[in-house]
Amino acid sequence: MNWYLLLGQATVNGLVVGLLYLLMAVGFTLVFGVMRMVNFAHGEFYMLGAFAAYVLMVHLGAPFLLAVVLTVVIAIVFGSLVEWLVLKPFRKDELNGMIVTIGLAMILQNVALMVFGPDPVSVPAIATGASSFLGVTVANSRLYVIAFAVAVLVLLYVFLRHSAVGRGLRAVVEDADIAALQGVKARLYYPLGFGIGIGLAAIAGALMAPLFSVSPFMGQAPLLKAFMVVILGGLGSIPGAALAGLCLGLLESYTALFLESSTADMLIFILVIVGMLAFPRGLIGKGEA
Amino acid sequence: MNTRAQPLPVTPANRETSRAGFRPVLFAVAMAAVALAVWPWLAGQFVLHLAIMACINIVIVNGLSLIDRSGQLSFGHSAPVALGAYASVLLVTWTGMGVVPSALLGLVFVALLAALLGWVILRLKGVYFVLVTFAFAELVRLVLLDAAPITGGASGIAGIAPMQIAGWLFDSRERFYLLALVMAVASLGLMIWLFQRPLGHAMEAVAANPALAESTGINVLRIQIVAYVIGSVLAGMGGVLIARYVGFISPESFGTSASVAFITMLVIGGRKSVYGPVLGALVLTPLPELFRGAVQTQHMFYGAALILILRFLPGGIASLVGMLRSSRSSQ
C-alpha cells in the first residue's frame, strides 16, 4: 500500500467527518451559548434532518440542494417551536434544562422509530464518479459534501458577523443581561438561537444522509463527538467548536490508519479528558468563571 | 423502601412540624412503608423482581445524590456501577477467593479509583464536570468492550454465581430481595446519618457556596472527593448486587442510558431531599412496565413524564411532601 495515497484518503475522510462534527458542535455550542443548556436532543435533530432529506428526496423526488434548503427551513421553524413550547421555562436552568432535553430526545427518537421503523434506509448519492488530485482519488460525492458544508459555514459566518439579527444573537451569547440592557430583545433570540442551532444539526444530517445510512439511532454517536468537541473547543465558543471539530475529525481519521477504531476512540477520550484538565475552559473558550 | 418510624432530620424547614402532634402521621407513613417493603414477598415473582431492581437503584441513586449534594452532578454514574460489578466478578475468577471478599476488594478498587479520578476532575465545575464524567463513563465502557480477553468484550460475562454470605446462598428472588432491601435501607440510613453530621453539613455548605465554605476553613476539594468516593462506592455496591442478581454483565448494561436513568430518578425523586433518591427509584423502576404495550410508546411516555414533572414539580416528588406539610401547618 502506498502511504501517500492512504494519507490523502484519510485527509479527505477526516475532513468530511470533521465538518460533520464541526456543524454539530457549532449548533450545540450556539444553543449552549444562548440558553446555558446542554442539549442532549442535538443528535436527534441531526437524525431528523437526515430523515427529512430522505423523505424529500426519495418520497417526494426533490433534488438534493432543494431538499437541504427545505430541511433547514423546517428545522429552524420546528426548533423555534420546540423551544417556545417545551424549553421556555428552563432557559438558563443548566441542570433541569439538560434533563428536559433528555426527555425530548427520548420522545423524538421513538417517534422516528414509530414512523420509519428500526431498519436503516439509504439516500441516493448526490454525485457519481471520482476525481483525482495529486494522485489521490476521491469520490465526488464526498467532495460535494465538503463543498456544501463549507458553504453553510461561510453563510453562517456572514450571518453572525454582518446581519443585525446575527449580531444580536452573538450579543445574547456573550451576555444576555447586558444585551437586554442594550435594547436587544433577548426573549426573541431564545427560540431563534435554538432554532438555528437545531438547523445546523439538521443540515449536518441532511448532508451526511447520502454518505451514511439513515436510522432512528444515528444521532447518538455524533452527539457524543459533539460533546468531545465542545469540551476541547470550550463551551459556548463558536471558533473553538469549529477548530476542535475539524481537528477531531482529522485525528480520528489518521489514528484509524494505524490503530483499530475502538482503540482510536479510547485514545481520543483520554486526550479529551487530559486536554480538559490542562485547559479547563477549552482551547479557545472563555468559559464561565 | 422508606421504612422505619425514624424522625425526619431536624432542619429549620421542618423543625416546627416535628412536634408531638405530627406523630400519628409519621406512624402511618412508617406502617405504609413497612407494608410496601413486605408486599413483594406476597405478590409474585414479577413484583419481586421489580422490588429487587428498585432496591438496587436506591443504593446507586443514593450514591449519585451524595455526589450531587456536595455540589457536583456526575453524568457518568454508570461507570462506578460497571467497575464494581466487573471488579467483584473478575476477582473471583482470577484469585478464586470468596464472593464476599472479592466484592469488598472490588469496592476498595472503586474507592481508590474514585479518589484518584476525583482528585483530578473535581477541579472542574458545573457543566464541565458533567461532560467530563460523561466522557469517563464512555471511556470505561470502551475499555470493557476492548479488553475482550479479560472482560468477554461485547458478549459480557455470563453464569455469575449467586451471592453467598456466611454459607447462606442468595439464589432465589425471595432471598435476594432480603439482601437488596437491607442494602437499600442501609444506604438510606447512611444518607440520613451523614447529613446530620458535620461532614454532611460541610458538603451542603460546599454545594451552596464553595467560596464561602472555603473561607470558613472547609477544604472544598477534600470534601467533594470524600463525597465522590462514598457516592462511587455506593454505585459500585449496586454493581456488585446487579452482577450477583442477574448473573450476567456486559458493557451495554452500563452505558449512557443507565447514567441517564440514574439522573432521571434523582431529579424526579428530588435532589434536595434525603428521600428523593428513594422516591425516584420507587416510582421510575416500575414505571416503564406501565407502558409495556409497545416499546416505543413506553419511551415516549417516559420522556413526556420527565418533561412534565420538571415543568410542574421542579423539586421532584419529595417536594410534594413538603408542600403537603406546609399546607397542613398553615391550617
Image (cartoon, rainbow, N blue to C red):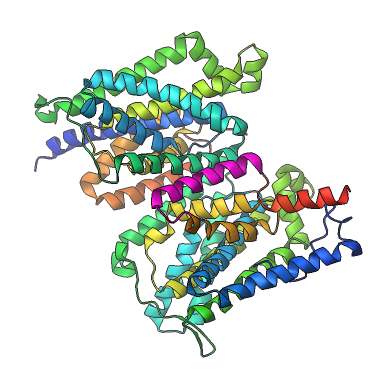
Quadrant for the N terminus of chain A, please: top left
From the viewer's perspective, is residue B238 above or below residue B13? below
Whether residue A278 is visible to the viewer of this picture, yes or no, is no
Q: Find out whether residue B310 is within the magenta segment.
A: yes
Q: Main secondary structure of the magenta part?
A: helix
Q: Looking at the picture, how far across and down is residue A225, in whole percent?
A: 38, 40
**Is B137 left or right of B25, judged from the image as shown?**
left
**Residue at x 43%, y 28% (from the top left corner):** A198
Is residue A90 among the parts visible in the rendering? Answer: yes
Q: Is residue A65 above or below residue B132?
A: above
Please indicate whether residue B258 sits to the left or right of residue B218 in the image.
left
**Residue depicted at 74% across the width and 47% down the height:** B214
Q: Is residue B318 left or right of residue B19?
A: left
Q: Is residue A111 magenta?
A: no
Question: Is the C terminus of chain A in the top left, top right, bottom left or bottom right quadrant?
Answer: top right
Residue B17 position within the rendered picture, expressed as x and y whole percent measured from the top left: 87, 56
